[in-house]
Amino acid sequence: MSTHDLYVNAPAGPVWQVPATGAARFSWDYDDGRERLLALYRKGKDKQWDGATRIDWDLEVDPYDPLGTPDEVLNLYGTRHWAKMTEKDKGDLRRHYSSWQFSQFLHGEQGAMICAARIVESVPDLDAKFYSATQTMDEARHAEIYGRFLHEKIGMLYPINDDLQGLLDDTLRDSRWDMPYLGMQVLIEGLALAAFGMIRDTTDKPLPKQILAYVMQDEARHVAFGRMALRDYYRQLSDAELREREEFVIEGCHLMRDRLRGVEVLENFGIPRKEAEELSEQSEFLRLFRKLLFSRIVPCVKDIGLWGERLQKAYLDMGVFDLGDSNLDLLMTQDEEIAERLDAQRFAAEEHARVTEVADAIAEGAAGE
């Protein structure tokens, strides 16, 4: 089935074209680069995996409750609209919300793939080009996996959110080579990691838990890559150049905070946009969710050296300033360990099943004799 047949609302067009600016940079220095980046590159090569085999696609998913979402976290819960909904309506609402979330993940991963390829083209250092080439493959795999989940398990897609599209547009149009790092590796990837983690840690559904755990294992490396490269580069910039990048971060954070409403879903249930926005703003769960989504971004921005007075004030106003002291390295280590633990559990279960099957076959043969 064509993807276009699965969209709830038709996308603006079959292809979104963003005019590209900036130089493609070649490096003729093939000596050893920065050991930290080369180590990350080696890890990126070693950790490649196939989404068709590592993920158990035979696991069933209820499209009307793909994530095991409790009633209380849905924006309409407790409202006059909720009182009128049948159980079927509530199932439809869960399906739409899950479709909206994973559709934004899918579109974001395609954006990450394009940004990673852009970094290969524009970054001046060969060690960074090497690593970003592995990331481009990672992002292609993630887009493949999210697309398959939406096609086969939910059967519904949403177009890219306007604010996410705006941030991607700003990131790709900028001619400075560090901006795809800042827009994608720090802002969009940081936001995605927090969103993936919240769902991974709360869902009781095995297939989405697998998908998110394995994707997050890759994304932890990507954020580490952005931190290393930008921390080195931003030490060399003037105060004026740093302020320009801080302005970009502030605008990007506002765009992402404002996009996390799922207003499009409520509109598809007949709720006027203004009321949908008000309901989203009143949701206690969404308010907490939106704050926690910055748990990966704020410490990363601080770590790379963008911590001017205006940026700190913006984070204070957004209520996320205290997240700047979060231990980002610990979070990334946990992402790696969760994926490895999930692998160990799955492979142990599969090995036990194989041993049991062999034992049963032997027992049946002996009984036949």
Image (cartoon, helix red, strand yellow):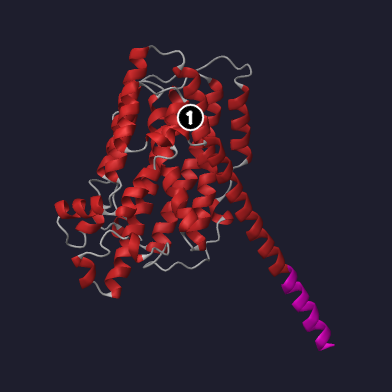
Residue 302 in the magenta stretch? The answer is: no
- The residue range painted magenta reads 355-369
Q: Is residue 101 visible?
A: yes
Image coordinates of residue 172 in percent, x first then y, are 34, 30
- Looking at the image, residue 14 sits to the left or right of residue 23; the answer is left
Q: Nearer the viewer, residue 324 or 30?
A: 324
Q: Residue at x 33, y 13 (%)?
A: 240
Question: What residue is disc 1 on?
Answer: 226
Q: Please name the residue shown 63% across and 53% down the image.
A: 341
Q: Can you see residue 175?
A: no
Q: How many neighbours does mark 1 have within 10 angstroms: few (below 14), some (14-19), or many (20 or more)?
A: many
Residue at the (27%, 70%) spot, across then down: 89
Q: 164 and 144: which one is in front?
A: 164
Q: Where in the figure is residue 232, as x and y percent of width and height? A: 50, 19
Q: Secondary structure at mark 1?
A: helix
Locate the N terminus by quadrant: bottom left
Check the image and name the residue furthest to the bottom: 368
The answer to whether residue 117 is above or below residue 243 is below
Name the amino acid type tagged 1: Gly
In the image, residue 321 above or below residue 267: above
Q: Looking at the image, which residue is at 66% across and 55% down?
A: 344
Q: Dividing the image into 4 quarters, which one contains the C terminus?
A: bottom right
Percent across and percent down for residue 322 are 41, 35
Residue 153: x, y in percent?
A: 42, 63
